[in-house]
Amino acid sequence: MDINEAKAKVAELHKELNHHNQLYYIEGTQAISDGEYDSLMNELKRIEELYPTLTSLDSPTQRVGGAPLTEFKQVNHPVRMLSIEDIHELKEEQIENTNENSEHNLIEWHKKTLNALPANQSTFTVEPKIDGVAVSIMYKNSKLQYAATRGDSETGDDITQNILTIKSIPTSLPNNAPHTFEIRGEVFMPNKAFEELNKARSEEGKTKFINPRNATAGTLKQLDPRVVSKRPIDVIFHSFGQINDLDLKTIEQYRKYLMELNLPVDKWFKIIQSSEQLRTAVLELDSDRHTFPYGTDGAVIKVNLIESHKSLGHTSKFPRWACAYKYRPEQGQTILKEVTIQVGRTGVLTPVAELEPIFISGTTVSRATLHNQDEIIRKDIRIGDTVVIEKSGEIIPAVIKVNLEKRPDNTVPFSLHSHINGKCPSCASTISKESGFTAWRCNNSKCPDQSIAKLKHFGGRRMLELEGLGISVAEKLVTSGLITHPLDLFELRSDELAKMELEPAKLNSGATSKPRKFGEKKAMKLIESIQKSKDLPLSRWLHALSIPNLGESASKECARTHRSFDEILNSSILELISERWEKENWIKNNPVKANKKNENSTSILARSSQSKEHKKRIQEINRILENYKISPELGGVVSTSLMTYLKSETGKASLNKLDRLNIHPSSANYAPIPSLEKAENLSLNETTWVITGTLSESRSHFKSIIEDNGGNVTGSISKKTNYLLAGQNPGSKLDKAEKLNVKVLSENELISLISTT
Ligand code: IVH
C-alpha cells in the first residue's frame, strides 16, 4: 500500500468508525459486532503505524491516548469557571414552623431575579444538576484543542487524553462550527457502572470509591489514559465558556445547537414562564430524577436570554442569572430488624441498623448508622420499630426518627451494653465508656476487628496510599497473624504476601470464586508502595496511625505547627491547648452561682476565685498561642487525645517502631507563625522555582508553600530558574534542569531548606 492508498483507506476507516461510534454512543444502537469494530480499529492502527504522519488528533485511535503522562499541563480558562449559588428546599421542620411550601426559597430567588430583569423578560430554563466533575472543552477551527478541569476556576489541568476516552466527544466538528467554541459540561460515571467498578475493585482487594463523583474525579486524575479507557465515564454538556462567531440568543437555542452537532445534552429540559410553572418543573424533576443514569440532587435554573446574563452580572462567586435548587435528602420508612455493633479502628463501638431493604435515591439500603448509644436513646429507637431513613448523595444513610404509630407492643428501650453483654463482639473483652464521652469502646489493642479496620485505614488513599491493601487483604493479614499492628507491614516479605490465600470472592453471578492466592505481582506492588510511603509527609502519618479523635484536618494543622513526631511529643503548643480545654471545661462544669439551696458562701467564693484564676490563665494561653493562628480543628479534645496516645504504651511502641524502621516523617506544610512567614526576610526570597512530577500533595499545595516563603513559581525551566522541585516521574523538566545546572530538590529537601534558612 503506498501513501496515497493509505491516505484514502485511513479516511474511509475514520468515516466508518466515527459512524459506528455515533450509532453506539449517541443513538444507543449497534450495527456491527464488537469483534468487527475491533478489527476496523486494528486495521486503522496498523496503517497508522506504517505511516505515522497519517495519525491525526481526530483519529478514532487517538481516543485512547498513548503513553502515560508525567504531569498535567495547566490551562488558563479564557472565561472563569464559576460555580452556582445553592438554594435549598425547605426541611420538614422549617415547613411546619413557617407554613411555607417546600419551594419557598426558590420562588423568592425567582422573584428577586425577575425584579432585576426588564419587565418583558420572564423565561427561565430548568434542567437537572448533574453530580459529576466539571470539564471545559475547547474547539478551535472545528478541531478539539484541549479539555480541562475546573481547577481553581481560573486554571485547570489539561486532561485531553482522558477526555478522548469518552466516545461521545468528537475530536472534530463540522467545518462551519464557530471558530472558537468552548463548551462546558459534567463528566460522570453512570450509577450502574460505578457499582460494577466498586464490586470489581473490592474483589481485587482495592479500596472502593465513595460515590460515582469521587470515582469520576479519581479517574480524570489518572495520568495513564489506558486506565481511564477501562473506566466507563460519560459527559453531558450544559454551558459554555468562550464562543466566537456564533449568534447565540438563548440557553434553549444553545442546547439545540449542541444537539445539531451531536454533542450530548440532558434529555430533561424545561422552559418556564412563571413561578407556578417553575414549581411544577422542579417537582416533576424530583420525581423523574431517580430514573436517570447519573446522580443528581438538584435542578439548575437559568435565565434563558443570554444577553441578560451580562446585565445581571455576578457576585464574587456566583452568576446572578442561575441557581442550583437542592432537593432535601430523600427519606423512606422501613423496619429495623436488628442492631449490630461494628468495631472501628480506634475501638469505638458503632451501632448499625440492619434494615428491611428499602430503595432510596437510586440504591437499595439495608444498613444505616445509628451513631452511638446516646443518639439511640435520644431518638428512642427500638428493634422492631418502623424507622425513617435519610440518604443524601454521599452521606451514609442514617436513621432519622421512629414512626411511633407503627411501634409494636413488645419493644424495649435499646441498651448497647446489654445488647452485647458488655463484651466486644469481635474479641469478647470488656467494653468501657469514658466519662464525658458518648462512645463505648473496646480497649483491647489486639482486638481483631479493630486491627483490621486500623490496617485498612493505614493504607487508605488519604493516608499512606498502599496499593492493593483492600478489606479482604487486611482481613487476611490480621487473621493469619502476619500483622498485629500496621507498622508490621514494613517487615513483611513479598514471598509471604504472594502465597497468602484470600477468602473466596462473591462474584456478580452470586457464586463464589475459588480460593485465590494474593500472587507475586500484587505482592511486589504492595511492597513497593509500602517502601514509597516512608517518604510521605508527617500529616499523612499522623492521620494513618488511627489516633483517637485525630482526623485529616487536625493532622494537617498539627504538621503545620510541628516538624516531626519528636516535636509533637515535646510540644508546648499541644500542652497549652489541652490545658486551656481542661480549664474551660472546669468553668463550664462549676458555675459560680449556688449549686444547691443553702450552699455555704465559702465554697461559692472558692469556686469564684478558682474560676477567675482559670480565666486569667486562659487569656494568657490565648496570648501565647495568638501568633500560631491555630485552627479550631486542632482543639482541646484532639490535643489531649494526641498527647495521651503518644505517652501511652501503644503510642510509645509505635514511635519506637518507627525509629527502629528508620522512618522519620517530616512536615511538608510547616509554617507555624503565618504572619511572620509573610514578613520581609523570607527563606526563599528572590528564588524562582519550577515544580514537576507526582508529589505527595497537589502542585498548588507546594506552590503555596514556596510562595508563602517568598519564592516564585513558574511553568518552565530557563536560565533564571534556581530550583526544580521534583516528585516521582519528573519527565523532561529534569533533563532540562540538569542541562542548565538548575538545582533539583525533593519535597523533603524543600522543607529542610525552608526550616534551616
Ligand atoms: S450551568 C456559571 N448546568 O454545577 C456556571 N452547571 O455548582 C454555569 N453543573 O459549575 C453552569 N449540572 O459544573 C450548569 N445543568 C447544569 C449543571 C451544572 C451540574 C455543575 C457545573 C457548575 C456546578 C455549580
Image (tube, grey):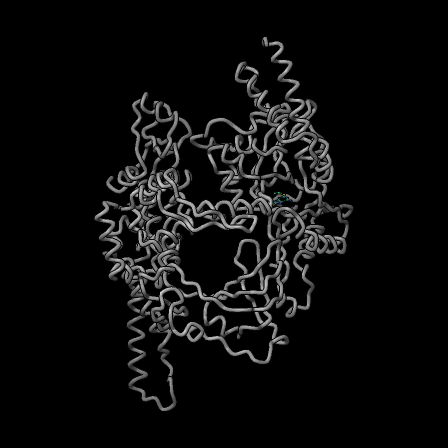
Quadrant position of the C terminus in the picture: top left
Residue 682: % across, % down: 30, 40
Q: Using residue 367 as the reference point, say whether residue 730 is left or right of it.
A: left
Among the 4 quarters of the image, the one containing residue 630: bottom left
Q: 650 above or below 250?
A: below
Residue 389 placement: quadrant: bottom right
| Residue closest to the far bottom | 598
Front residue (pair 459, 239): 459
Residue 649 lies, in percent from the top left, at 24, 61
Where residue 570 appears, x then y in whole percent?
23, 56
Give the answer, above or below, for where 400 lies relative to 67.
below
Q: Nearer the viewer, residue 98 or 261?
A: 261
Using the image, determine if residue 508 lies above or below residue 616.
above
Of residue 581 and residue 136, the one placed in the foreground of this image is: 136
Q: Position of residue 418 (x, y in %)?
A: 43, 76
Q: Is residue 380 left or right of residue 34?
A: left
Identify the residue shown where x is 32% and y is 38%.
747
The residue at 54%/73% (across/down) is: 383
Count of residue discs: 0
Q: Position of 430 compared to 137: left or right?
A: left
Where does ligand 1 appear, by image quarter? Answer: top right
Image quarter in which the N terminus is found: top right
Residue depicted at x 29% and y 65%: 579
Asked if residue 220 is positioned above or below residue 511 in the image, the reply reads: above
Q: Is residue 138 visible?
A: yes
Q: Quadrant of residue 311?
A: top right
> Can residue 677 be seen in this snapshot?
no
